[in-house]
Image (tube, rainbow, N blue to C red):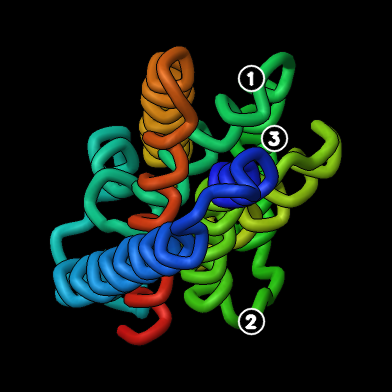
Amino acid sequence: MAGFLDHRLFQPRRTHAGGVERDVLSEGMKISLTRRFLALAAVLAIAPWASAHPGHEGDHGGVTWDFAGGFAHPLSGWDHLLAMVAVGLWAAQLGGRARWLVPSAFVADMVAGAALGRAGFHLPGSEQAIAASVLVLGLLLARAVRLPVTAGMALVGAFAIFHGWAHGAEMPAAARGLGYGAGFVLATAGLHAVGVGLGSLAARRSDRFARYAGWVVTAAGVALFAA
Ligand SMILES: [Zn+2]
């Protein structure tokens, strides 16, 4: 858009200005249509895999309540995985102290959420909140939204409570849960680190990687809602 405006501002006397303008507009419309098509294709491609995974909605087939089970869980479904990588990418986009403070807030509040769930505190709509976290984090990335570090921490922290609560609440009373929790936290921190690392590396060249990744995550968030 800026380029288009510059073009008009700095070359106002061009004889074929009308033709140039039409070409620029139709080019813009083509790009916009291509983006919409890609977004739709991403939703259709992701939707079958975006549904709840083992350990959600009361389906505990194959879940072990130990370190390995906890470590595997965030990697076993798109909802946690995309949200956690997106937190890292967004933290990298914010830069500075946010690169470690924002992911740290997610991990801390996720643990707090798990403790709440374990204690029997009822939190309705966790599946929807987890889907919303994927959608919102995708949009923050895609639009490169800048928030103060504390606001960013509060926002991802609020989502993290639901990511943690779902698992604290579903854990059988007999399970000790410490090993499972430790594995879960380690995998989460690892996914944050992947996001921060990839985001920081890509940002040295341009902000496009994070923005496109944001649209893919947004599409997945839409698919999670639809699932
Ligand atoms: Zn889960």
Disc 1 residue type (three-letter): Trp
Count how many numbered circles sit on residues in the image.
Answer: 3
Is residue 68 rendered to the left or right of residue 132?
A: left
Residue located at (80% from left, 32% from top): 149
Q: Is residue 151 left or right of residue 120?
A: right
Q: Nearer the viewer, residue 89 or 178?
A: 89
- Please state which amino acid type lies under the numbered disc 3: Ala
Q: Is residue 204 above or below residue 189?
A: above
Instruction: Say which residue label 2 marks.
Output: 124
Residue at 57%, 44% in the rendered image? 7
Q: Which circle's residue, 1 or 2, is located before the other in the chain?
A: 1
Q: Position of residue 31 (x, y in %)?
A: 33, 61
Image point 79% across, 46% down: which residue?
A: 154
What residue would you read off at disc 3?
105
> How far across and down, in percent of the image, does residue 78 sit?
29, 57
Question: Where is residue 187, by image quadrant?
Answer: top left
* Residue 197 found in image quarter: top left
Mark in the foreground, 3 or 2: 3
Which residue in the structure is indicated by mark 1?
100
Above or below, 11 relative to 200: below
